[in-house]
Image (cartoon, coloured by chain):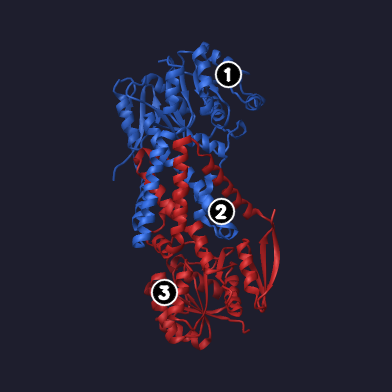
Chain colours: A blue, B red
Amino acid sequence: MVRVREVCVLGLGLIGGSVLRAATAAGYSGWGSAGSAEDVAAAAAEGFDVETSIGAAIRRAARAEAIIVLAVPLTAVDSVLEEVHAHAPHCLLTDVVSVKQPVADRVARVAPATRFIGSHPMAGATSSSWAASSAGLFDGAAWVLCIEQETDLAGWGEVARLALDAGAHVVPASAAAHDAAVARISHLPHVLAGLLASVGSGGGPLALSLAAGSFTDGTRVAGTRPELTQAMTEGNRDALLPVLDEALGLLGAARAALASTGSLAATINAGHEGAQALARGRSARRNAVHIDLSVAESAKALLALGEQGGMIVELDGMIATGLVPQAR
Amino acid sequence: MVRVREVCVLGLGLIGGSVLRAATAAGYSGWGSAGSAEDVAAAAAEGFDVETSIGAAIRRAARAEAIIVLAVPLTAVDSVLEEVHAHAPHCLLTDVVSVKQPVADRVARVAPATRFIGSHPMAGATSSSWAASSAGLFDGAAWVLCIEQETDLAGWGEVARLALDAGAHVVPASAAAHDAAVARISHLPHVLAGLLASVGSGGGPLALSLAAGSFTDGTRVAGTRPELTQAMTEGNRDALLPVLDEALGLLGAARAALASTGSLAATINAGHEGAQALARGRSARRNAVHIDLSVAESAKALLALGEQGGMIVELDGMIATGLVPQAR
């Protein structure tokens, strides 16, 4: 395996810009381009290596056999994939879009010959331009790297190395498992925050003047730019619908219990247990495990590690080291 | 009007303890008692003036014509009110329970001759013992003081002075308006936080390992002791039910829109507008208004001030000074 040291970033907003900054800071030779002339100009003004067209950046990636990182909004993915297919059809390709199965479907349709490894760094999204990007955005963050039974492990390892070099911890998961998980822990919170802000402000100035911590915390992400929240949640429609149904079921059950018995015990106790599971997971001691990526059946071991809440924290040659929460 | 300088606090947990500390720090002569022998002993150990029985504390209040502050859980209100009715039937009485109409109903039934002014300081509730109390708990906090058209304004002013002396800002509101407002901005957030924690942890260790800011913020109050959340939300059942219905309607509409049109625009835009209304209210310039409490029709002016998101910040004799957000 040749250690990839060159990276081409397409899209230079918050995430793409941060990937380019973090990769070059880690010693990669990196360049980029974007649909936004403003982001391209801002990156150039800071001395970053930018091409004025996405096509030119891709052609250069084909010559250099660089990793291509797709960092454009989901709505722009198809048109950029067409250029990838035209100019670098066999490249090692990853993306950083917040939903994974829809991107994988587009790649299979538009750029089927690429070595594609979908990914999603779990890092901030309340702003979206190059100006908001930073080399440290991924420090200690979880970075999901998609893997299925048939995934090419050598390519997976190369993208994992980029994520680790950018400061992140790598969480292996299937595209479907990723989309189901983020529907629960990111997209539902955004829908509920919006709903709570609506109901709260429906109480008028008196209600808002009494709002304290529980309301402020519960509505914080409702302040995100609406188009970003829309793109993220609507892009994950198939995984989000059953989660909304689950939430509707629980809220309806709470309403019915309060009306009929006067008790919210079931709702509140289950929520308290969930909050404690989160706290336990965060404070759990972790065991180190080692997985050899040159062994074909390692995809299964990586998926199992992710399902247990584990993360890859190091990659030495083809030996990945992960940390898995200790059962207790 | 005689300026009341003596205060009797019944219940010495987080709120009652903090009232006793803040009042004595402000120069009041204050004493207390509580059902919890542990809280009584802890207060005595710090040199506070405590009676070993609630009955003794009430009899002393009757002799001194002190304000009595009822700071026990809603479930204990009836039995303490019986003692108030027995030993100090005509006292000036307030309470600091988190729901107001249910307490007003109990007072009308059990201690109907008291001069009762319900109140609710909007201050922390994740802990509940004397050990967690502090003299600064109410600094800058909103403290709702109930007022109806028929409320005795002299008594209202005496309780308002106590709240102001404790460091709070006084929000005048009817009991019904208070209960409806806190259902929206405090009790619904607690129900949604529990629901979100349940749905999130239902995704298992993988989902929890990906949880970032939106989930952490949205579930924070699900970590509150379940019995405290239950007492607060269940005690406000009548006002909370229509708010849960409103939330169910909005969540169902979001689900239907996503399923049929693929768009969450209505939900997300309304939420964003709500979040901005909250931010606008907090940053608004405020106009000073003066209300003379010795004038009978001032109850109407106080209610209007609260409905506009205003607060009383000073009381000089019978002249209350409020700040009202400037329209823009």
User: Which chain does tag 2 point to?
Assistant: A
Instruction: Tell me the CA gap for discs 1 and 3.
Output: 70 Å
User: Which chain does tag 3 point to?
Assistant: B
SS at mark 1?
A: helix
Reading the image, the residue beneath label 2 is A201
Which numbered mark, 1 or 2, is in the foreground of this view? 2
Please name the amino acid that badge 1 sits on. Ile
Query: Taking A31 as reference, is B247 above or below it?
Result: below
Q: How many marks?
A: 3
The image quarter in which residue B126 lies: bottom left
Pinpoint residue B104: horizontal percent, then vertical percent.
48, 74
State left or right for residue A237 relative to residue A31: left
Pinpoint residue A24: horizontal percent, then vertical percent.
55, 24
The residue furthest top is A63
The image quarter in which residue A2 lies: top left
Residue at 60 percent across and 31 percent down: it is A130
| Residues at marks 1 and 3 touching, judged by CB atoms closer than 8 Å | no
Query: Taking A70 as reference, is B230 above or below it?
Result: below
Q: Which mark is residue B77?
A: 3
Please name the amino acid that badge 3 sits on. Val
Residue closest to the eye, A315 or B220 = B220
Residue closest to the eye, B281 or B308 = B308
Reading the image, the residue beneath label 1 is A54
Are discs 2 and 3 both within one chain? no
Which numbered mark, 2 or 3, is in the foreground of this view? 2
Instruction: Tell me the CA gap for discs 2 and 3.
Output: 32 Å
